[in-house]
Image (cartoon, grey):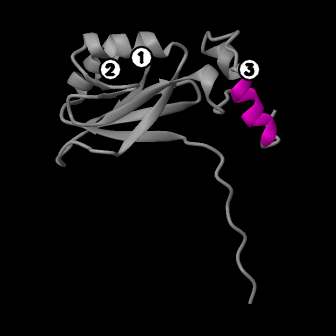
Amino acid sequence: MGRQPKAKLVGINHVALEVGDVEAALEFYGQIFELTLRGRVGRMAFVDIGDQFIALAEGRSQPPDDQRHFGLVVDDRDAALAAARDAGAELHGNTFTDPWGNNVQVVAYEDVQFTKAPEILGGMGLDGLEKTDKAREELRAKGLA
């Protein structure tokens, strides 16, 4: 009896983030990032990230997160962190905590392996985003560049 082949992870389609109030979450995150609303269903709002999205789901009931977090890739990390501070978020290095206790790490596109196809970047108005030499080397070492 042979082993079943395993599926390869290709990427993340979306992250569902539980918040106390969807309208307040759209306002909070809209102070930090340029938001494009993909749509709404019930107590959820969907915010585009190019070919991916974040679902803001109303109904958070658990206490604030400690170590659990997710990372968002941005074109300007310093601007995002400054905006988060201005919006009243608590900052810990390059991570901020939203009003519902979700920890969001902010990383610069240029510094990480995560890569968008040129046509996706162009459609997002982000032509010309480059990678650091270190990020390019990490990609090359994996045969991805």
Amino acid, disc 3: Pro
**Dot 1: within a 10 Å radius of its alpha carbon, few (fewer than 14), some, or many (20 or more) residues?**
some
Magenta-tinted stretch? 133-141
Q: Please, what is the three-letter code of the amino acid marked with disc 2?
A: Tyr
Kindly identify which residue carries mark 3: 118
Kind of residue at disc 1: Leu
Q: Which mark is residue 29?
A: 2
User: Is 143 left, or right, of 54 in this rendering?
Assistant: right
The x and y percentages for residue 118 are: 74, 20
Marks 3 and 1 close (CB-CB < 8 Å) = no
Chief SS of the magenta region: helix
Few, some or many residues within 10 Å of mark 3 (<14, 14–19, 20+): few
Q: Quadrant of residue 135?
A: top right
Write the residue at 46% across / 34% down: 71
Which label sits on residue 35?
1
Which of the two discs, 2 and 3, labels the residue nearer the N terminus?
2
* Secondary structure state at the residue bearing disc 1: loop
How far apart marks 3 and 1 lie (CA) works out to 21 Å
Residue 51 percent across, percent down from the top left: 59, 29
Element under disc 3: helix
67 lies above or below 38: below
Q: Nearer the viewer, residue 40 or 61?
A: 61
